[in-house]
Image (cartoon, rainbow, N blue to C red):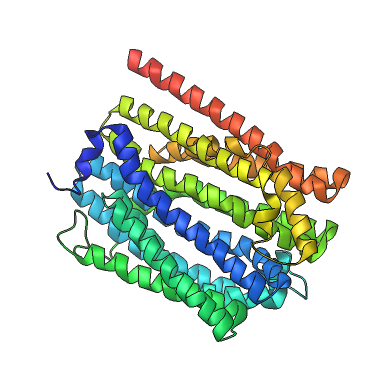
Amino acid sequence: MSKNDPHILGKEHIGKLLLQYSIPAIIGMTITSIYNIIDSIFIGHGVGPMAIAGLAVSFPLMNLVVAFCTLVSAGGSTIASIRLGQKDLKGATEILSHTLMLCITNSVFFGILSFIFLDDILVFFGASSDTLPYARSFMQVILLGTPITYTMIGLNNVMRATGYPKKAMLTSMVTVVSNIIFAPIFIFQFEWGMRGAATATVISQFIGMVWVVSHFINKENTVHFEGKIWKMKKRIVDSIFAIGMSPFLMNVCACAIVIIINNSLQEYGGDMAIGAYGIINRLLTLYVMIVLGLTMGMQPIIGYNFGAQKIDRVKQTLRLGIISGVVITSSGFLICELFPHAVSVLFTDNDELIDLAVGGLRLTVLMFPFVGAQIVIGNFFQSIGKAKISIFLSLTRQLLYLLPCLLLFPNWWGLKGIWISMPVSDALAFTTAVISLMIYIKKVSKQVQQ
């Protein structure tokens, strides 16, 4: 049996598989998040506190960049693993070519449209006259590089899902190490500021893209490019979009919510409050990305075994995933509650910005331990192809709970109300996810008994 034989997903011990698939993904996501943190540190100390605020203003647009990418990459990787579970190698190969073409198409469409209306978009997202130049300089370069970004991320997810988790991890390592080398040179040595940070990102992603494409060109790999890859079938496109719709909507909602947060912060705290949220967002994203790395490792295991009708192995993977997710976000909760000043001062030496970040951090993480379980449960439904449930859970925190809180709480408690909105919505979203999972398990158990 080949070392990279995807069929071990139906035979090997679940705990061993989860480690084998999740650890590389977690390392990759952690490295990526650490880079984002280091990049923010470079910007904060090399450009200034207003640059941190400008970066925070660009977060909603970055979420949209990710949204249109995950619409394809999440759907493609999920279906590819299910096809392999069904012993359908030809079907998995078709998914690969569709993923590539859809990534390129989406990136060109989104990149051009956003570039044309960039200033209007950033002002709508909460940019002031002071922060707009920083946000514009950063996003212009990022948008020009979207075809590179989408191709790298999309194909890397398929690589992981088709039995190569370590190579997928190396993609992240290659891009991040390159980024960490280029960023300080462009920001400090060349004095390119925000544009330098973005240029370093795009060049590094190009290196990662070359690495991933070379993998799928190699015909010795389990799934590789074959035939006329530009030919697409409507039924496959529809199935990819159906599965990818959940993370897509989640990122779109995250974009909408951050727009509301930024504008509320501008009203109740000004540019510095937006900068504080930028610091908080970077820190919490680190732990969320680690959990997402865990779910990336779970996805091919759950997808394969669900496709192979091995339900007990699916349940076991889910159980271990939930426990691991809670442990990860609980560690983030402890660090942010015990050492908020120490982590905030990494990003800036501006006292006002540090004080705002410390106060906001302590409030926003109050229910953070439950976030890990909520993310894992949502991704579980995506992994088994239950798109509607996954979409519902993706929307609950953002639209059903967080949005009303953000519209009400600041009127009562000002800036503190914005921070409090987040743990309240986290608790409600966790409760909803657990109830949805219990209902689904009960339904499946009845079907098995019949």
Residue at 61 percent of width and 67 percent of height? 41
Residue 103: image location, x then y, percent: 40, 63
For the question of whether residue 125 can be seen, the reply is yes
**Left or right: 335, with 449 as reference point:** right
193 and 149: which one is in front? Answer: 193
Does residue 389 appear in this view?
no
The residue sitting at 34% across, 60% down in the picture is 170
Q: Position of residue 361 (x, y in %)?
A: 70, 49
Vertical side of 254 occupied by 189: above or below: below
> For residue 39, what is the image quadrant?
bottom right
For this rendering, which residue is in front, 153 or 244?
153
Quadrant of image for the C terminus = top left
In the shown orientation, is residue 441 left or right of residue 436?
left
Please determine whether, in this image, residue 147 is positioned above or below residue 87. below
Residue found at x 61% / y 77%: 194
**Residue 381 coordinates in the image, percent (x, y):** 44, 36
Q: Quadrant of residue 46?
A: bottom right
Q: Residue furthest right?
A: 412
Front residue (pair 133, 240): 133
- Residue 25 image offset from top left, x and y in percent: 39, 51
Report the quarter where the N terminus lies: top left
Residue at horizontal 50 percent and vertical 23 percent from the top: 438
